[in-house]
Image (cartoon, rainbow, N blue to C red):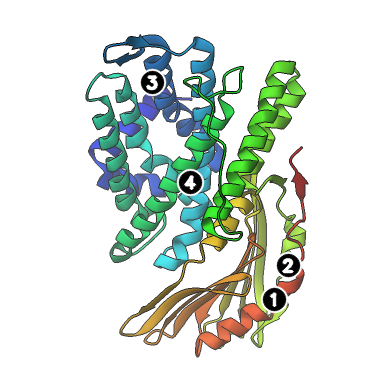
Amino acid sequence: MDFSKILARAKALLLTPRTEWPVIAAEPATVGSIYSGYIVILAALPAIAQFLKFSVLGVSVVFLGTYRTSIGLGLSNAISYYVMSLIGVFVLALIIDALAPSFNGTKNRVQAVKTSAYAYTAAWVGGIAVIIPGIGWLLSLAGGVYSIYLLYVGLPHTMKAPPEKATGYTVVIVIAGILLAVIISLVSSSIIRTPGGSGLYGTSAPAATGSFAPNSVGGGLQELAARVEKAGKQMDAAQKSGDSAAQAQAAGNILGAVLGGGSQVEALSTDRIKSFLPATLAGLKQTSSSAERNGALGMQVSEAKASYGDGAGPGIDLEITDMAAAKGLMGLASWANLEEDKQTQTGYEKTFKQGDSMIHEQWDNSSKHGEYSTMLAGRFMVTARGDVANIDVLRTAVGSVNLAGLAALRNEGLKAAQ
């Protein structure tokens, strides 16, 4: 690990992002190398600063003096925040990758991780300022805002999004990032409890007195909160017991509560997901295919791709993705029931819910290019895109996949949290 290179990269991103992003996009890398060579260092900065502020320097309270948390609690809090930040980078990268085609970008898992990691640079560096009395929070906020700018500048280079699409792409990613930050904060605070089961300041959380409707966003978040609370109690018990195996199991349950909808999930094997690629699609023969399963920090994603054509003209590309590890988050997206219907001079783009599935359609009459995708069982995404006669061809192409068989695997690889 070359610390001088890490510092040089961070400095270049902060001072000359428009010249640094093309360099980042072009250099060879893997998810592992980006984590070990950059993320694990930069993401630690705000966690260390938080520990110093609350457990070493203390927080000045008007009329009361300086308040400090215990060293043990401060360390636990910093570690929890750090681990969840590492996970958040990868989850945001999955979102960036999944959204790329919607903004005429190119899906690429490694480039998506680059985008997420290097865009966070300003926020991580700005997080150090929290130790500065008075204006620390303002400097930290400035770092977060500048990270949004870094994201905007980087997307056209890493994800190949057209500059005119970068603004919308950025806005959607930022919204997802804010939701992730909220979840990370909730999970971190759920993990860190005092021996008596109370919160940071020794007061217990009030009991819930109502509930949201089932299958609503509020209901989904309420279920998530309940799962996290249960997992947090298991962590408390494991810590008291001193059983390292129980502590590891409890930590896994917390991740499963947030990402897997209450379960730890293993993505489909490459052979299994590839078997859903049909030999022919919309009358076209399969000309090539591939499948891969990637993972970082215990989160797995499987993807199978195939191209179809007859050699006489443009064909169709088909992708099947198993977002196993993010099953819980995808469930929340489904509950949100987001709908969009946008008309342009040459076509349209719309997102809507059909039964239990989310559908996305995009069509351009001038280029005769389109995309049709469906999200199944809160876990699988099936997408067809290409230059065809009309959107019905792509709709039929997706329909020719064994969607029912794929949806039936919604619980494949799930290991319920204990």
Contact (Cβ within 8 Å) of mark 4 with mark 3:
no
Q: Which residue is mark 1?
A: 401
Q: Counting other residues with Cα less than 10 Å from the Cα at mark 2, is it few (<14), some (14-19), or many (20 or more)?
A: many
Mark 2 and mark 3: span between their CA atoms?
A: 46 Å
Q: Counting other residues with Cα less than 10 Å from the Cα at mark 1, is it few (<14), some (14-19), or many (20 or more)?
A: some
Element marked by disc 4: helix
- Amino acid type of the residue tagged 2 in the rendering: Leu
Q: Earlier in the sequence, mark 2 or mark 3?
A: 3
In the rendered image, is residue 298 in sight?
Answer: no
The image's mark for residue 406 is 2
Q: Earlier in the sequence, mark 4 or mark 3?
A: 3
Q: Earlier in the sequence, mark 4 or mark 1?
A: 4
Element marked by disc 3: helix
To which quarter of the image does residue 406 belong?
bottom right
Mark 1 and mark 2: span between their CA atoms?
A: 9 Å
Element marked by disc 2: helix
To which quarter of the image does residue 357 belong?
bottom right
Which mark's residue is nearer the viewer, 1 or 2? 2
The image's mark for residue 49 is 3
Q: Is residue 24 above or below residue 196?
A: below
Q: Is residue 174 above or below residue 204?
A: below
